[in-house]
Amino acid sequence: MQIPSTELQSSLIEAVPNLRAFGISLCGDVDRADDLVQETLVKAWKNIGSFNEGTNLKAWLFTILRNTYFSELRRNRREVSVDDSAIEQRLSVHPEQQGAADFSDFKKALMQLSDDQREALVLVGAEGFSYEEAAEISGCAVGTVKSRVNRARGRLGELLGVNDSSEFGPDATSTAALVSFKS
């Protein structure tokens, strides 16, 4: 590498405030502009042999800074910024096998309910009908539907050995089942 003349070194140092101002005007961030200036000076120093003394040093440095800025801008457009907490959530995945086994147990328990309890629970929980709509469909009173749904939920809890919804895993199948049967 060729060592630049003292005059060229002085010219490099004198250009720093102008480079910094140009960097700020490009990116709008003082810290990022300082990084751009530093990177520009490193590149200029490494490639000082390609600079022809007597030509416009400032124009050469501004070109390096500008090209560096736009190259990084293009590179950053291709990169996806991801929230670290989102990555952490994706790194840990609960096993789906347990959810499938739990859902199979749930279906078996559901079939053990009386027909009227199963019907009321499916209409209100899975299909999303209101108690009034379920009562109209079933041809009974609203209070009867509420009672059937309550007894069905209690019986399912007994059959599955579940006292609270928090005992289900957060896998997709269990979550879907829980969401469907919320009142």
Image (tube, rainbow, N blue to C red):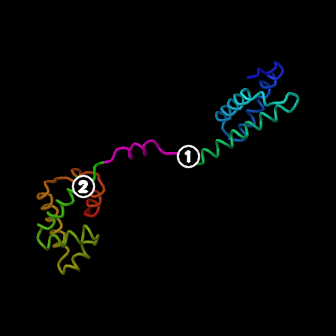
Which residue corresponds to the image point at 17% horizontal and 62% vertical from the top-left?
Answer: 153
Q: Say which element carries label 1.
A: loop
Q: Position of residue 106 (x, y in %)?
A: 18, 61
Mark nearer the N terminus (2 vs 1): 1
Magenta run includes residue 90: yes
Q: Image check: 45 left or right of 175?
A: right
The residue type indicated by label 1 comes to: Glu
Question: Quick check: 29 above or below 105?
Answer: above
**Of 129 and 42, which appears nearest the observer?**
42
Give the image location of residue 148, x and y in percent: 15, 69
From which residue to which does the magenta span run?
80-93
Find the residue positioned furthest to the right. Answer: 54
Q: For mark 1, what is the residue?
A: 79
Residue tagged 2:
99
Residue 9 left/right relative to 139: right
Mark 2 Cα-neighbour bin, 10 Å: few <14, some 14–19, many ≥20: many
Image point (61%, 44%), residue name: 75
Spot occupied by residue 156 in the image (x, y as percentages of width and height) = 15, 61
Could you say which is closer to the camera, residue 131 or residue 175?
175
Q: Quadrant of residue 88?
A: top left
Q: CA distance from mark 2 to mark 1?
A: 35 Å
Looking at the image, which residue sits at the far front? 1
Q: Is residue 38 above or below residue 170?
A: above
